[in-house]
């Protein structure tokens, strides 16, 4: 596996740290004392994180630890019971998923959520929606702006698909893609919305080792090309240790460790959480 | 490969539909002008076109935006009765002008009704639209049953429940007479005008669907959570589809009304809404070609089915339920799909062996 060189993490003003290269840039995301209860169940509690402008951060933990729930909090699918989420310095309290997407957060889903019956290209164009500059009436009356913008978004969609070498699949319906390609399409679609922070929920699930290797390279490529931050949930430790600059480990809804890949690998609490007999 | 969906297939389908409408028009216009058509069928031509408009516009809501509306006839009646008032109020303006203005105003008033219903309902996530539109259809019918409108040289007079409250001078003419409905309508609708309206509506729907806006509507239908995470507001696009659809039903209602000399509110009741829904479901949810054909065939069919008159709605209901079960039940759909696949494979195998 091609491993990224280990970077140094530095403290920023707050309980968080980010890679040294991002230290002088504002954080894309900062969450403090975040928590949510479902009825009596405390699914997430005291979750604190700061993500640097071009950081690749991993969120790991055993099944049911609350990782996906954290994505749902950050993207406002759930309104947090406690704590704050700052996106680009703005509090997202009471905002909707639509609003936070427009502020620069985009995600993929653990259980793939593509627009199944639409084509691959249409899926990407829906991601581009807020960057396509014509109005409903221009579309209905097929005004010049419609043709111009549709052409532009067609080209942009193919460009984005090409990151994963999927441009030739543009006209295939999304649900006919193999599983791995569906995951890649979700990433392209999220990227099309023009995020500053990309959340990937188990992007390598169901992929074989060579697909995973390629995915790692592409995630790095996306970060470098678009200069965005990535927060990813993943069970594949090769991927996590290979591309993440920092890692947050979650267990029972709480952070049990934070640090560089080598710090995490050697952390006895993490090993305990993963191998502990009290949890499958 | 059947999984390949060409980008051009959408526009091919659109042109197929324009073709169907044009052929339909040419055939029947020829039959009419050569006198080769029964008077019963001739009288049905405008209603058929109106029901085609109703079906494609309802399909925009049910098929494209994925919401169930059970009160589409309510919008039709709003358009119809608005058109009666407008056309009467225009006095002796030229008929085509009266027709066009009535259609536009009818569509506009229906759009407002749709907008007002949509605002509270479509912000909720669930099947509330079905219940509210059902209620709307019934309420509109009851309101129109109590509505009296008269026109004299001073203008249009409205009264509710009490025709004497109209306060017209003796030369005034009652246009809408409570439960008796609209009376003395001037029959100014024409078959070509209705077809032109259908054509315009088809163009609007198909261009809308094949645009940024239509993609957004379908994305929200297919996966609301994903669409929201892409920055698409479900409320905005569901409202748009619903309001546009209501306005189209209003325009259809206008043409429909101006084809009769009298019209009762009861004409646009729940049964009519369900009838239109049947066209949509039978023609295929989201399939505009199917809606056109289903509406065309099923408006003519009752004439033939008249023998079973009492069982007609029962038959419709049973067909509707069966089709809904099949189209909405993934397991059942899967089973039917595999059945047909096996069936086809067997045929193919059989063919090869022999
Ligand atoms: N909407 C909800 N209502 C009630 N409980 C929920 C809800 N969403 C998540 N939970 C619970 O919260 C806990 C965390 O779930 P979550 O899906 O975040 O785990 P995860 O870390 O993503 O696990 P996995 O690795 O299996 O994806 C689980 O116990 C789950 O049952
Ligand atoms: Mg999860």
Image (spheres, rainbow, N blue to C red):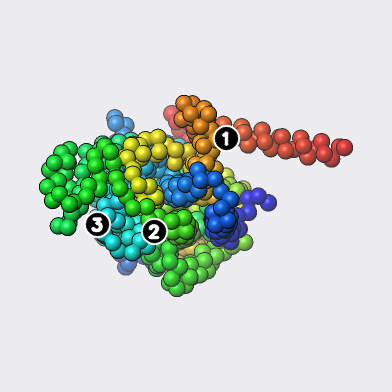
- Residue at the front extreme, as displayed: B171
CA gap between label 3 and label 2 equals: 60 Å
**Which chain letter goes with mark 3?**
B
CA gap between label 1 and label 2 equals: 39 Å
Residue located at (51% from left, 64% from top):
A157
Residue located at (77% from left, 37% from top):
B347
Report if the CB atoms under discs 3 and 1 are less than 8 Å apart: no
Q: Residues within 10 Å of mark 1 (few under 14, many from 20)?
A: some
Question: In the rendering, which numbered label is found on residue B333?
Answer: 1
Mark earlier in primary sequence (3, 1): 3
Going by the image, does B323 lie left or right of B110?
right
Q: Secondary structure at mark 2?
A: strand
Q: Which callout, 3 or 1, points to the residue nearer the camera?
A: 3
Q: Residues within 10 Å of mark 3 (few under 14, many from 20)?
A: some
Report if the CB atoms under discs 3 and 2 are less than 8 Å apart: no
Residue B257 percent across, percent down from the top left: 36, 48
CA gap between label 3 and label 1 equals: 53 Å
Rendered view: B300 above or below B1: above
Determine which residue is flagged by label 3. Answer: B89
Going by the image, does B283 lie left or right of B225?
right
Q: Which callout, 3 or 2, points to the residue nearer the camera?
A: 3
Q: Is residue A240 visible?
A: no
B261 or A153, nearer to the observer: B261
Q: Quadrant of the N terminus of chain A?
A: bottom right
Q: Secondary structure at mark 3?
A: helix
Q: Can marks 1 and 2 be said to lie on one chain?
A: no
Residue B177 percent across, percent down from the top left: 24, 42
Determine which residue is flagged by label 2. Answer: A197
């Amino acid at each position: 596996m091609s491993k990224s060189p280990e970077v140094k993490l530095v403290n920023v003003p707050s309980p968080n740290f980010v890679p040294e290269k991002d230290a002088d840039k504002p954080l894309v995301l900062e969450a403090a004392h975040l928590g949510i209860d479902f009825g009596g169940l405390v699914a997430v509690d005291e979750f604190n994180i700061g993500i640097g402008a071009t950081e690749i951060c991993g969120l790991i933990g055993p099944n049911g630890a609350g990782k996906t729930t954290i994505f749902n909090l950050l993207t406002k699918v759930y309104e947090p019971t406690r704590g704050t989420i700052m996106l680009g310095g703005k509090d997202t309290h009471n905002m909707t998923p639509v609003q936070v997407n427009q502020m620069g957060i985009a995600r993929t889903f653990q259980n793939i959520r593509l627009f199944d019956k639409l084509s691959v290209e249409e899926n990407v164009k829906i991601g581009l929606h807020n960057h396509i500059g014509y109005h409903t009436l221009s579309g209905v009356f097929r005004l010049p702006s419609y043709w111009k913008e549709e052409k532009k978004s067609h080209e942009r969609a193919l460009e984005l698909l090409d990151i994963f070498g999927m441009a030739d699949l543009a006209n295939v319906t999304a649900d006919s893609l193999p599983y791995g390609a569906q995951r890649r399409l979700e990433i392209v679609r999220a990227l099309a919305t023009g995020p500053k922070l990309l959340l990937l929920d188990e992007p390598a699930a169901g992929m074989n080792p060579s697909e995973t290797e390629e995915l790692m390279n592409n995630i790095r490529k996306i970060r470098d090309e678009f200069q965005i931050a990535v927060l990813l949930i993943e069970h594949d430790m090769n991927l996590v240790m290979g591309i993440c600059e920092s890692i947050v480990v979650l267990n029972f809804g709480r952070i049990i460790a934070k640090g560089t890949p080598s710090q995490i690998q050697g952390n006895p609490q993490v090993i305990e959480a993963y191998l502990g007999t009290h949890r499958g | 490969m059947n999984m390949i969906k060409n980008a051009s297939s959408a526009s091919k389908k659109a042109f197929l539909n324009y073709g169907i409408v044009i052929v339909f028009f040419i055939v029947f216009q020829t039959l009419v002008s050569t006198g080769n058509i029964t008077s019963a069928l001739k009288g049905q031509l405008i209603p058929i076109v109106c029901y085609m408009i109703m079906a494609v516009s309802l399909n925009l809501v049910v098929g494209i935006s994925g919401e169930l509306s059970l009160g589409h006839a309510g919008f039709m009646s709003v358009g119809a009765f608005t058109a009666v008032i407008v056309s009467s109020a225009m006095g002796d303006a030229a008929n085509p002008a009266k027709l066009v203005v009535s259609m536009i105003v009818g569509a506009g008033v229906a759009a407002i009704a749709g907008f007002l219903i949509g605002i509270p309902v479509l912000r909720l996530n669930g099947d509330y639209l079905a219940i509210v539109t059902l209620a709307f259809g019934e309420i509109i019918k009851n309101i129109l049953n109590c509505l009296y409108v008269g026109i004299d040289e001073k203008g249009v007079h409205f009264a509710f429940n009490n025709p004497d409250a109209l306060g017209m001078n003796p030369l005034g003419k009652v246009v809408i007479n409570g439960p008796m409905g609209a009376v003395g309508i001037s029959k100014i609708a024409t078959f070509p005008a209705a077809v032109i309206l259908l054509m315009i509506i088809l163009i609007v729907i198909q261009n809308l669907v094949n645009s940024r806006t239509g993609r957004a509507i379908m994305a929200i239908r297919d996966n609301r959570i994903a669409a929201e995470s892409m920055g698409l507001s479900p409320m905005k696009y569901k409202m748009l589809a619903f309001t546009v659809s209501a306005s189209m039903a209003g325009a259809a209602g206008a043409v429909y009304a101006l084809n009769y000399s009298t019209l009762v509110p009861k004409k646009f009741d729940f049964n009519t809404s369900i009838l239109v829904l049947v066209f949509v479901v039978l023609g295929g949810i989201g399939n505009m070609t199917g809606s056109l054909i289903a509406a065309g065939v099923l408006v003519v069919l009752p004439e033939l089915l008249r023998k079973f008159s009492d069982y007609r709605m029962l038959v419709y209901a049973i067909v509707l339920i069966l089709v809904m079960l099949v189209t909405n039940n993934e397991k059942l759909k899967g089973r039917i799909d595999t059945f047909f696949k096996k069936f086809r494979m067997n045929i193919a195998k059989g063919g090869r062996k022999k």
